[in-house]
């Protein structure tokens, strides 16, 4: 009997020390932030997201500061229809919450899920004339169809005043040595498509000024 009682005490102690059952991710209080992309469906006053690689319609709540509503109105010309979107989100209490819109485009331009995901801190582009800028850490690369086709600069720390962020960059060879890259946080359309960007962009070097849109 003493052995049985001792065994019972050991079992009870082991059960008391057993770790709690893990809480499923969807029922956790908050997780993220994460980058999301997929098709945004606007139905009456609600938003649904079909994330890339899935067929599930998931409810989405967009914070007013996310600018997702602004992107939807501009890309769909006020119809509050559907569009491809990329944004930063949190999961709060199982609900997907959009924090910051990064890019949006009309579904008529094809599935954005087929496009490669961005790997740069900032990417900007312009048309007429065409130009393209990428910022990755301290490396800023400007591409244009005219020579030189590519110029690589070392970027200083960005300086932000209100809605304007300015980045100065330098290089130690070539005719162009200094460049200024400006980002204004406001709605932008690239002029060649129905795409929406969260920043207007300007690149200046020498007497040249290039204008376009930017995203991260």
Image (tube, grey):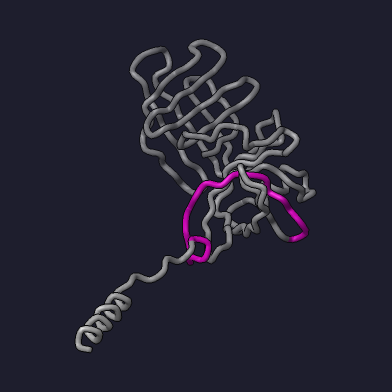
Q: Residue at x 60, y 32 (%)?
A: 115
Left or right relative to 206: residue 95: right
Q: Position of residue 147 (x, y in %)?
A: 51, 10
Q: Is residue 171 above or below residue 74?
A: above
Q: Residue at x 51, y 20 (%)?
A: 143
For residue 44: magenta?
Answer: yes
| Residue located farthest toward the front when viewing the structure as drawn | 1
Q: Position of residue 211 (x, y in %)?
A: 59, 29
Q: Position of residue 104 (x, y in %)?
A: 65, 41
Count the labels in the image: 0
Q: Is residue 148 above or below residue 192?
A: above
Q: Main secondary structure of the magenta part?
A: strand
Q: Position of residue 91 (x, y in %)?
A: 53, 59
For residue 212: magenta?
Answer: no
| Residue located farthest toward the right when viewing the structure as drawn | 79
**Magenta region: which residues?**
25-45
> Which one is nearer the viewer's eye here, 208 or 76?
76
Image quadrant occupied by the N terminus: bottom left
Q: Residue at x 53, y 66 (%)?
A: 93
> Which one is nearer the viewer's eye here, 164 or 12?
12
| Residue located farthest toward the bottom when viewing the structure as drawn | 1
Q: Is residue 210 above or below residue 92?
A: above
| Residue located farthest toward the left when viewing the structure as drawn | 2
> Which one is nearer the viewer's eye here, 148 or 40?
40
Q: Residue at x 54, y 18 (%)?
A: 144
Left or right relative to 89: residue 105: right
């Amino acid at each position: 009997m003493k052995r049985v009682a001792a065994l019972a005490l050991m079992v009870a102690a082991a059960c008391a020390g057993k770790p709690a059952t893990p809480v499923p991710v969807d029922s956790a209080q908050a997780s993220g932030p994460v980058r999301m992309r997929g098709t945004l469906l606007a139905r009456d006053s609600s938003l649904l997201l079909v994330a890339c690689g899935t067929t599930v319609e998931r409810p989405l709540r967009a914070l007013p500061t996310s600018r997702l509503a602004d992107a939807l109105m501009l890309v769909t010309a006020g119809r509050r229809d559907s569009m491809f979107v990329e944004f930063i989100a949190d999961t709060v209490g199982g609900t997907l919450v959009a924090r910051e819109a990064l890019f949006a485009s009309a579904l008529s331009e094809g599935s954005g899920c087929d496009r490669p995901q961005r790997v740069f801190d900032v990417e900007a582009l312009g048309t007429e004339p065409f130009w393209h800028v990428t910022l990755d850490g301290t490396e800023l690369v400007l591409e244009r169809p005219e020579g030189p086709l590519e110029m690589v600069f070392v970027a200083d720390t960005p300086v932000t005043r209100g809605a304007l962020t300015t980045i100065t960059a330098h290089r130690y060879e070539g005719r162009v040595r200094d460049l200024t890259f400006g980002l204004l946080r406001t709605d932008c359309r690239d002029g060649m498509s129905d795409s929406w960007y969260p920043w207007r962009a300007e690149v200046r070097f020498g007497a040249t000024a290039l204008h376009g849109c930017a995203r991260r």
